[in-house]
Image (spheres, rainbow, N blue to C red):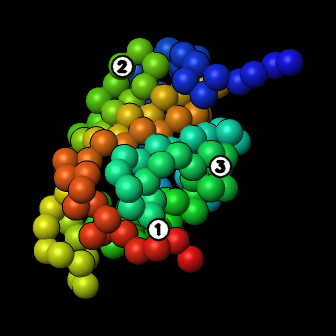
């Protein structure tokens, strides 16, 4: 039996290529470009969010990750951020502003994307206010 490890080390060795992948990830969210997002994640991609809200926990598989992404950006405007590169990951530190109808506050989110075979295979997001994050998100439809 062949088991795929979502956290396998990246086969991307060029830091510029890792940075490009990180920028494409942020651009997909900013532009709500789900085709772009789908093109840069693996079929078995996993996205994990902390807390107890509707979006908390693990979403497994590309289609579930994209559905989570659609709801994730529904009440947030992605703001300024920085992309950091390491051996097998890209990390993004992004400041998000809540949109109307949601408490007027800023959420600082760090997202670490592990790469495999030139794509993102695992997304882990970290929130500055885990208990308050459910104020930003609506229930999954």
Kindly identify which numbered label has been placed on residue 62: 3
Q: Residue at x 34, y 33 (%)?
A: 91
Say few, some or many: other residues with alpha carbon within 10 Å of mark 1 (under 14 / 14 to 19 / 20 or more).
some
Kindly identify which numbered label has been placed on residue 19: none
Residue beneath disc 1: 71
Q: Residue at x 38, y 56 (%)?
A: 52
In which image quadrant can residue 117 be found?
Answer: top right
Q: Position of residue 63 (x, y in %)?
A: 66, 56
**In the image, 11: left or right of 22?**
right
Q: Position of residue 120 (x, y in %)?
A: 55, 36
Q: Is residue 96 visible?
A: no
Asked if 78 appears above or below 104 in the picture, the reply is above
Asked if 12 appears above or below 27 in the picture, the reply is above
Q: CA distance from mark 2 to mark 3?
A: 24 Å
Secondary structure of residue under mark 3: helix
Secondary structure of residue under mark 1: helix
Figure label count: 3
Q: Residue at x 57, y 49 (%)?
A: 59
Q: CA distance from mark 3 to mark 1?
A: 15 Å
- Front of the two marks 1 and 2: 1
Front one among 38 and 100: 100
Q: Position of residue 127 (x, y in %)?
A: 26, 47
Kindly identify which numbered label has been placed on residue 86: 2
In which image quadrant can residue 112 be found?
Answer: top left
**In the image, 63: left or right of 51?**
right
Q: Is residue 11 visible?
A: yes
Q: Position of residue 81 (x, y in %)?
A: 23, 47
**Residue furthest to the left:** 105
């Amino acid at each position: 039996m062949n088991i795929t490890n979502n956290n396998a080390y990246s086969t991307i060795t060029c830091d510029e290529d890792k940075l490009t992948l990180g920028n494409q990830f942020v651009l997909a969210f900013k532009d709500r470009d789900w085709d772009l997002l789908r093109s840069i994640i693996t079929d078995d991609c996993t996205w994990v969010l902390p807390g107890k809200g509707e979006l908390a926990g693990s979403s497994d598989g590309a289609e579930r990750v994209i559905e989570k992404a659609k709801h994730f950006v529904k009440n947030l405007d992605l703001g300024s951020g920085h992309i950091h590169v390491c051996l097998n990951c890209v990390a993004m530190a992004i400041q998000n502003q809540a949109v109307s109808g949601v408490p007027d506050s800023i959420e600082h989110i760090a997202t670490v994307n592990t790469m495999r075979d030139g794509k993102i295979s695992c997304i882990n997001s970290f929130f500055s206010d885990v208990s308050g994050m459910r104020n930003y998100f609506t229930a999954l439809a």
